[in-house]
Image: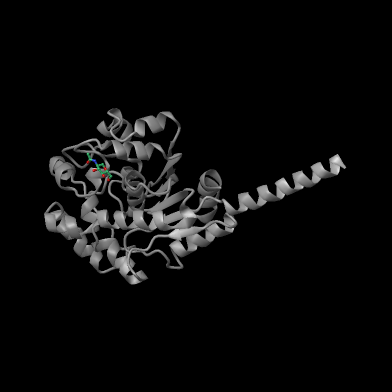
Amino acid sequence: MINIFRIEVSLLLLTRLCVTSYTTKVPVVLWHGMGDSCCFSYSLGKVKSVLEENIPGVYVKSIRIGTNNIEDVENSFFKSVNEQIEQVCQELSMDEKLKHGYNAIGFSQGAQFLRAVAQKCGGPQMQNLISLGGQHQGVYGLPNCASIKHYFCDMIRRMLHYAAYTKYVQNNLVQAQFWHDPNREEEYRKRSTFLSDINNELQINETYKRNLKKLKNLVLVKFDHDQMVQPAISEWFGFYKPGQAVEIETLHNSKLYIEDRLGLKEMDANGKLHFISLDSKHLQFDIEWFIEAIINKFLV
Ligand SMILES: *[C@@H]1O[C@H](CO)[C@@H](O)[C@H](O)[C@H]1NC(C)=O
């Protein structure tokens, strides 16, 4: 009798465990890049289905800024980044399915935006942040518009070179808000309305630091033959040495790291930073790599 009872109890427990583990797959939040949207079937729509196939039962939310996909694309060029972050913070905190936490994958500029979400939002806890080609030290050049099929792209390149740090451009052009001119470091620090703030350039915001350190992992994927991001090392938090645009300074040699202004040094010491490089162009990776190196390692 007792034995049968025990078996029943353990069966019950086992069933419960299975159901629980099925329903508590950590949800995934995606944020797309410039000129893209949440849901195009050839880009993030595809990523979403790969995640769903490989993490059965997972809830995937792909961020859309605006009421439709076209607005979403336009906003990836022309909406204040800080306003976008605020909106996303609200949306994530109101989503019941995320309340126990979530993992995040950012594509290109979506990666630095999700880092800002991690640092600024009080909402549900982001656990792992995967940055695919994110420009964490900004860009100094958008060398190639060819892969962005959008007529704004060339106009934007010109505007960035001539007027990136004017108030109007900072407030209205997304890419200006992470434009980092190494010949004008001082101006960048003071006038960049988004990137220099989240990188604690002028002052150290302890909230940013504390929140970033709560991540379990920050995975930085760099595309070695990146034709979109200049310099590609920005994808690993590196940049040009101040005052010129040839020589590179790696994260480990930067003031950001040495003074640990953002908590990255501590995260590195705790094994939370992952530097991955791919021998390919911007955001070009194959699905097998994505499943093995990202999903199986960090998301299941
Ligand atoms: C630090 O960041 C938080 C979140 O964005 C903000 O509320 C706070 O005012 C900032 N603190 C300082 C000193 O700027």
Q: Residue at x 42, y 48 (%)?
A: 124
> Image quarter for residue 53?
bottom right
Residue 159 drawn at (x, y percent): 16, 59
- Residue extending farthest front: 1
Between 177 and 149, the residue placed more toward the observer is 177
Q: Evaluate whether residue 96 shows in this view.
A: yes
Between 218 and 232, the residue placed more toward the observer is 218
Residue 264 drawn at (x, y percent): 35, 34
In the image, is residue 175 above or below residue 195? Answer: below
Count of number-bearing discs: 0
Residue 176 placement, left or right of 118: left
Q: Residue at x 32, y 42 (%)?
A: 233
Q: Residue at x 76, y 45 (%)?
A: 9
- Indicate which quadrant contains ligand 1: top left
Q: Residue at x 18, y 48 (%)?
A: 192
Residue 169 drawn at (x, y percent): 15, 58
Residue 82 drawn at (x, y percent): 25, 53
